[in-house]
């Protein structure tokens, strides 16, 4: 039921979190205005276009589609009317060595056979993994969908019910020891923690659900790229009367007496609203949009001491050839534990990094001309706490990565087929995309930065301020960011009902 009187909401940033909150609130009758500095919606869930080639800028894995389906349903829409979903199987290939390639499939019997073929004796553990992690997720999901705005929220029934299933104080790697004996196979079910900014040897066992969610619900591609998701969300907002102001960066958040009084825009104008949602990178927004004198808890010193995720270097290669390569392929470093430690502790650029290849043209012919393809290369790296001279050394690193790809794939003619190329390094993520330290997966998800201890959806410093995105609860990752928008949308509706 829509509200009788219109309250207004101003959202800084048209990323997936801001868009999900904007969709919900616009549909519920709020006067929503989104201020986005780029000439397009989506933030990092947008597109890179180079001539006839189209790439996703950031996220390429799309799972837990039920979160987005429910957001569309809550506004009276069907997600499938807005985007074309393409389910992938195999989900991805994991390459340890040329003779050790594990195709990860949703076919559970086939997956068991795939495991047995490379890791004899470990196939039986797969069924136990699915059974036990499904129980865990069923208990944890309500807690992740709940807001944690006050300390007493730790006593919510949904969290109390989940506690016995969180496997504290184990790590994700230890948790996988319950199911598998092979260290390499444990990596196959724990590599996702790297994108939480943590190694599987330190990440809380709670996050064993990450690999379960892939195996249980599958991974999807969207025709045209995942950037089509945020375009669809922007369209839905405008259909319900919301306004998205592109190329309209916010210069400053105006604070008075612990309340936001307005937003000063770069064009010199000021806009006001009843509620404000910050969808920009959390630490960058605090440091650059809010004067430090107005921040009591999140001072610059406090922000600098918080734990941040790794960064990445991404190469976008438009190729005049199609290669025999799965849609998603992950190449594991020969010394994975050292590689992860170098990344998460910001100690050095690895001599033998893991890397990920996204080859969507094998699934989606709309992204490149006939006979051509798009290859997205992602190398996880330390964030900018590690001083590295990307300006002078990027070309050398680029060539080393191409050499590594050629060595491990056997694509010896790769260089000669590159017809378009773009690279985004950690320093560019920070300077050009406004990401603190270039930490593309935002704050780490250690115990001191989870639930109530993570920046909260209802931001406690200002009475009418809310947060969405990877830096707030429930955390990073595309479906989790959508969930942050849904939680924030609900909190604003509840605040309005109390007026």
Image (tube, rainbow, N blue to C red):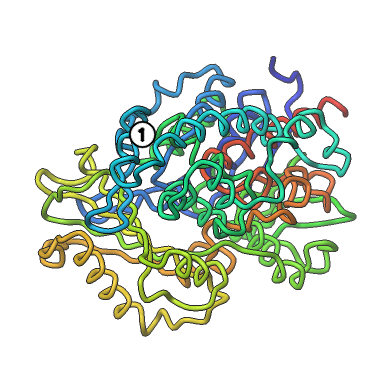
Please name the residue that numbered disc 1 is placed on: 112
Q: Position of residue 296 (x, y in %)?
A: 85, 63
Up/down of 356 relative to 5, above or below: below
For the point 69% across and 29% down, the residue is: 142
Q: Is residue 47 left or right of residue 132?
A: left
Q: Residue at x 71, y 51 (%)?
A: 169
The C terminus lies in which quarter of the figure?
A: top right
User: Can you see residue 84?
Assistant: no
User: Is 345 positioned to the left or the right of 420 in the image?
Assistant: right
Where residue 10 appears, as percent x and y from the top left, is 67, 43
Q: Position of residue 359 (x, y in %)?
A: 25, 48
Q: Which of these two is toward me, 265 or 366? A: 366
* Image quadrant occupied by the N terminus: top right
SS at circle 1: helix
From the viewer's perspective, tell me whether residue 347 is left or right of residue 149: left
For the point 41% across and 49% down, the residue is 185
Q: Is residue 366 above or below residue 82?
A: below
Residue 59 position in % (x across, y down): 43, 48
Total of numbered circles in the picture?
A: 1
Q: Which residue is at the far front?
A: 121
Number of residues whose C-alpha sits closer than 10 Å to that of mark 1, classed few (under 14), some (14–19) or many (20 or more): some
Q: Is residue 10 visible?
A: yes
Is 410 on the left or on the right of 125, as rendered?
left
Q: Is residue 275 above or below residue 438?
A: above
Q: Residue furthest top?
A: 1
Q: Quadrant of residue 378?
A: bottom left
């Amino acid at each position: 039921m829509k509200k009788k009187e219109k309250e207004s909401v101003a959202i800084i940033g048209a990323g997936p979190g801001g868009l999900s909150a904007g969709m919900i609130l616009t549909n519920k009758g709020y006067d929503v205005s989104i201020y986005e500095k780029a000439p397009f919606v989506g933030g990092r869930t947008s597109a890179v276009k180079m001539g006839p080639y189209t790439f996703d800028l950031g996220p390429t894995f799309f799972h837990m589609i039920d979160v987005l389906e429910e957001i569309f349903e809550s506004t009276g829409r069907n997600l499938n009317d807005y985007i074309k979903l393409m389910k992938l199987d195999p989900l991805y290939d994991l390459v340890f060595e040329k003779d050790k390639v594990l195709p990860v499939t949703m076919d559970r019997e086939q997956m068991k056979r795939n495991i047995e073929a490379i890791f004899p004796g470990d196939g039986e553990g797969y069924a136990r993994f699915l059974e036990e992690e499904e129980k865990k997720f069923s208990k944890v999901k309500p807690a992740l969908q709940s807001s944690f705005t006050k300390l007493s929220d730790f006593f919510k029934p949904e969290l109390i019910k989940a506690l016995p299933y969180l496997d504290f104080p184990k790590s994700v790697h230890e948790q996988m020891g319950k199911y598998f004996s092979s260290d390499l196979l444990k990596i196959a079910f724990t590599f996702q923690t790297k994108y939480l900014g943590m190694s599987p040897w330190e990440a809380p066992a709670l996050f064993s659900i990450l690999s379960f969610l892939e195996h249980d619900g599958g991974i999807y591609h969207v025709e045209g790229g995942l950037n089509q998701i945020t375009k669809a969300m922007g369209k839905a907002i405008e259909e319900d009367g919301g306004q998205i102001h592109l190329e309209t960066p916010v210069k400053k958040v105006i604070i008075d007496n612990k309340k936001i009084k307005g937003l000063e825009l770069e064009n010199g104008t000021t806009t006001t609203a009843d509620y404000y949602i910050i969808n920009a990178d959390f630490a960058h927004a605090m440091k650059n949009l809010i004067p430090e004198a107005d921040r009591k808890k999140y001072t610059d010193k406090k922000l600098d001491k918080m734990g941040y995720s790794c960064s990445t270097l991404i190469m976008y290669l438009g190729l005049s050839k199609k290669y025999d390569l799965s849609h998603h392929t992950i190449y594991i470093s020969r010394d994975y534990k050292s590689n992860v430690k170098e990344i998460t502790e910001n100690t050095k650029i690895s001599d033998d990094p893991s890397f990920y290849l996204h080859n969507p043209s094998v699934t989606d012919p709309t992204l490149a001309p006939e006979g051509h393809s798009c290859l997205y290369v992602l190398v996880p790296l330390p964030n900018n706490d590690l001083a590295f001279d990307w300006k002078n050394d990027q070309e050398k690193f680029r060539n080393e990565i191409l050499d590594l790809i050629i060595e491990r794939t056997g694509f010896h003619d790769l260089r000669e087929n590159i017809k378009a190329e773009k690279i985004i390094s950690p320093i560019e993520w920070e300077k050009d995309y406004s990401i603190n330290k270039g930490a593309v997966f935002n704050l780490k998800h250690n115990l001191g930065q989870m639930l109530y201890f993570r920046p909260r959806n209802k931001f406690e410093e200002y009475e009418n301020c809310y947060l969405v995105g990877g830096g707030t609860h429930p955390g990073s990752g595309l479906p989790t960011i959508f969930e942050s928008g849904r939680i924030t949308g609900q909190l604003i509706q509840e605040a309005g009902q109390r007026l």
